[in-house]
């Protein structure tokens, strides 16, 4: 890692912020196409903060060793996907303890009813997950993550839209009650397609780290042969027409979207090209496009995971940058709500 200086990176550009949970041993194609590709594209224009949401991942009971390992993998995958850790702050949420503090202050501005309405919580509990209080208040911690960095935009997939809405509500409410303190963030969700990649085995459900079956998910770490096999076995429909229609042909539409986002070819053009060819040809080409796109990604990821000390240095650098912003936000926030400012030194106060 070359020399990096904090002052050289002083923010001139508007900020963006986003995070991913380390809840599996790899990110998947939905995380990549719905968010990571966008993160990479935006980092030139914006002062970017990208973090591993390790505190959020504690909402699901997990073996501690898994959390540690997955946190490093997630960070390595951000970088392997093209995030530059010397210009964008790449960090672990728990390395900036102010996240938990802001989460608490915001929780005290949040109505129980607002959390009750959150669909992710409702879905998870409906599926029989044993919910804890952390899972219930998860969106408040997430709102704090975003508000902390005065983020103008938050690049996420479609499934995070409701969380962004509650974040905006909380920021606006806080500003009304305590005076202008926070930037009200805008979601930055891809319009076209990649914003919701579907499960290959159940194309009516999103591809998910925790809910999908292994066969339904393209893990960014999968061997190319495994990836190709999963794509060839993707559920489609009983017609043979390659046509984009997410309502009646969700499986085929998902494959078209994956191809289109990765190859940069418009969906209509793909429909024309595969017309009369059946699903086998489409699947074969999607497999090629995906494995080709992921080859350099995998090489870089292996290199990063082979040198955890280097990776940890990137994370330390990112946490240092993030911490600078977070401390300033908390100073403003504590002051706004009336918390007494701590004396600088207890020893000198006592003479
Ligand atoms: P997480 O870890 O579930 O997902 C990370 C990102 O990937 C996107 N995504 C998808 N996009 C398209 N198709 C899919 N099938 C798909 N599955 C996931 C998500 O929209 C997300 O952008 N709550 C967040 C983590 C978080 C966060 C934050 C995000 C915590 N604090 C602050 C932004 C800002 C989550 O669980 O993402």
Image: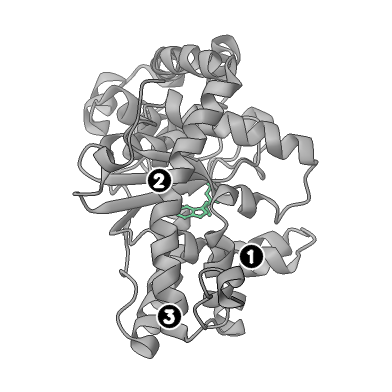
Q: Is residue 218 above or below residue 344?
A: above
Of tags 1 and 3, the one toward the viewer is: 3
Answer left or right for 9 relative to 32.
left
Where residue 243 appears, x then y in whole percent? 34, 34
Q: Is residue 225 above or below residue 197?
A: above
- What separation in Å lies between label 1 and label 3 (alpha carbons)? 32 Å
Q: Which residue is mark 2?
A: 321
Q: Which residue is mark 1?
A: 121
Kindly identify the residue that appears in the image at 23 percent across and 32 percent down. 268
Where residue 295 appears, x then y in whole percent? 45, 12
Kindly identify the residue that appears in the image at 64 percent across and 62 percent down. 123
4 or 161: which is nearer to us?
A: 4
Kindly identify the residue that appears in the image at 55 percent across and 40 percent down. 207
Answer left or right for 294 relative to 308.
left
Q: Which residue is mark 3?
A: 335
Callout 1: SS? helix
**Earlier along the polypeptide chain: callout 1 or callout 3?**
1
**Earlier along the polypeptide chain: callout 2 or callout 3?**
2
């Amino acid at each position: 890692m070359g020399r990096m200086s904090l002052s050289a990176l002083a923010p001139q550009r508007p900020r963006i912020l986003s995070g991913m949970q380390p809840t599996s041993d790899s990110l998947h194609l939905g995380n990549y196409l719905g968010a990571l590709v966008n993160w990479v594209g935006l980092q030139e224009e914006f002062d970017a903060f990208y973090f591993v949401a390790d505190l959020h991942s504690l909402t699901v009971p997990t073996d501690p060793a898994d959390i540690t390992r997955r946190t490093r993998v997630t960070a390595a995958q951000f970088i392997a996907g093209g995030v530059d850790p010397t210009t964008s702050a790449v960090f672990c949420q728990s390395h900036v303890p102010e996240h938990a503090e802001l989460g608490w202050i915001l929780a005290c501005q949040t109505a129980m009813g607002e959390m009750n309405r959150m669909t992710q919580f409702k879905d998870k509990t409906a599926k029989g997950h044993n919910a804890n209080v952390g899972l219930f208040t998860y969106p408040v911690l997430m709102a704090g993550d975003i508000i902390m960095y005065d983020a103008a935009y938050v690049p996420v997939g479609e499934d995070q839209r409701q969380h962004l809405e509650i974040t905006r509500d909380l920021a606006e409410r806080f500003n009304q009650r305590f005076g202008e303190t926070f930037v009200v963030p805008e979601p930055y969700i891809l319009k076209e397609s990649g914003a919701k990649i579907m499960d290959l085995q159940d194309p009516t459900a999103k591809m998910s780290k925790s809910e999908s079956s292994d066969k339904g998910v393209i893990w960014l770490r999968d061997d190319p042969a495994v990836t190709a096999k999963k794509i060839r076995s993707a559920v489609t429909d009983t017609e043979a027409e390659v046509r984009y229609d997410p309502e009646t042909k969700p499986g085929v539409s998902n494959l078209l979207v994956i191809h289109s986002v990765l190859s940069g070819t418009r969906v209509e053009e793909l429909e024309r090209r595969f017309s009369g060819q059946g699903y086998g040809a489409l699947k074969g080409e999607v497999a090629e496009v995906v494995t080709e796109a992921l080859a350099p990604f995998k090489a870089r990821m292996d290199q990063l995971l082979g040198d955890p000390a280097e990776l940890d240095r990137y994370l330390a650098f990112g946490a240092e940058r993030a911490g600078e912003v977070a401390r300033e936000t908390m100073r403003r926030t504590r002051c706004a709500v009336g918390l007494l400012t701590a004396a600088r030194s207890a020893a000198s106060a006592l003479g």
